[in-house]
Image (cartoon, rainbow, N blue to C red):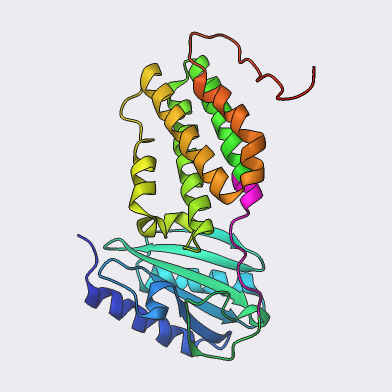
């Protein structure tokens, strides 16, 4: 059974009481949807702690407490510069994302921030996903999807095509000023764009379906490049068209003819 709202509130209260009682914690803040009053029935809890002294000592101390007092089932870490994000799973599928930040880096890096106690520091905002890297992922994944289809590696081809779709959504979200990470702004993208992206979904693992899905994904990729990076679309469009036109029967990939020169 999933956690109840009352259980989530009780755990949050317990977290804050423990943070206030810990001499090594100099600040606490909610982030995410809770910080801006946008949480719903299913929201997890994102808590940032400002740590005085050694970060690893605080991590070990709090991790022991999570397992002892909150009956944690598992945890794992995400890197975050000098900070550490430790993600805990509690009974009832209650997720707690704990960021342990050095005291000098306890401060908002985006609009979703609510200080509970302690003094905020001036810190740099999180950088958005890099467009150049996203474009690189797109042509890389398109190429490797095509190669995998040639090699009859159907599931690996599915992996690359699906990853391309995710990057197109990220690129479009960046262009429109929407939340770009983890498809958080996907539900806000224009319906006509999402209808095109829906056509890239793979319905079966077969050569014909993978070819169709790859061609559809390359088409939406090319269209998004024309909107987000037109100069790159001019260079990359003909190359991507080659991959869209290839089939598993055509043999080796054939490079496009140059558009100028003898």
- The stretch drawn in magenta includes residue 93: no
Q: Quadrant of residue 126?
A: bottom right
Residue displayed at 60% across by 35% down = 139
Q: Is residue 130 found left or right of 260 in the rendered image?
A: left
Q: Is residue 50 found left or right of 160 in the rendered image?
A: right
In the current view of this chain or complex, which residue is farthest to the right? 262
Tell me where residue 11 appears, x and y as whole percent. 33, 77
Quadrant the N terminus occupies: bottom left
Of the pair 178 and 60, the residue shown nearer to us: 178
- The stretch drawn in magenta includes residue 131: yes
Of the pair 233 and 32, the residue shown nearer to us: 233
Q: Which residues are magenta?
A: 123-134
Q: Quadrant of residue 3?
A: bottom left
Tell me where residue 84 appears, x and y as whole percent. 58, 66
Residue displayed at 59% across by 91% down = 119
Most frequent secondary structure within the magenta stretch? loop
Residue displayed at 56% across by 89% down = 23
């Amino acid at each position: 059974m999933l956690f109840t709202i009352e259980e989530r509130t009780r755990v949050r209260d317990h977290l804050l009481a423990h943070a206030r009682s810990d001499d090594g914690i100099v600040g606490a803040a909610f982030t995410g949807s809770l910080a801006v009053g946008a949480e719903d029935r299913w929201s997890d809890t994102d808590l940032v702690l400002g740590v005085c002294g050694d970060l690893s000592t605080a991590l070990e101390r709090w991790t022991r407490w999570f397992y002892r007092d909150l009956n944690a089932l598992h945890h794992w870490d995400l890197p975050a510069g000098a900070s550490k994000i430790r993600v805990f799973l509690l009974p009832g599928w209650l997720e707690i994302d704990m960021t342990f930040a050095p005291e000098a880096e306890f401060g908002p890096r985006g609009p979703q921030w609510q200080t509970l106690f302690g003094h905020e520091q001036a810190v740099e905002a999180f950088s958005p996903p890099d467009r150049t890297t996203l474009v690189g992922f797109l042509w890389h994944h398109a190429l490797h999807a095509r190669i995998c289809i040639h090699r009859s590696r159907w599931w690996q081809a599915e992996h690359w095509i699906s990853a391309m779709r995710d990057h197109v959504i990220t690129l479009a979200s960046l262009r429109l000023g929407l939340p770009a990470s983890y498809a958080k702004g996907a539900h806000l993208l224009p319906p006509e764009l999402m209808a095109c992206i829906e056509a890239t979904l793979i319905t079966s693992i077969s050569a014909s379906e993978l070819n169709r899905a790859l061609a559809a994904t390359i088409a939406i990729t090319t269209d998004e490049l024309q909107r987000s990076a037109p100069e790159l679309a001019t260079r990359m469009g003909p190359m991507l068209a080659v991959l869209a036109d290839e089939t598993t029967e055509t043999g080796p990939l054939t490079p496009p003819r140059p558009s100028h020169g003898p």
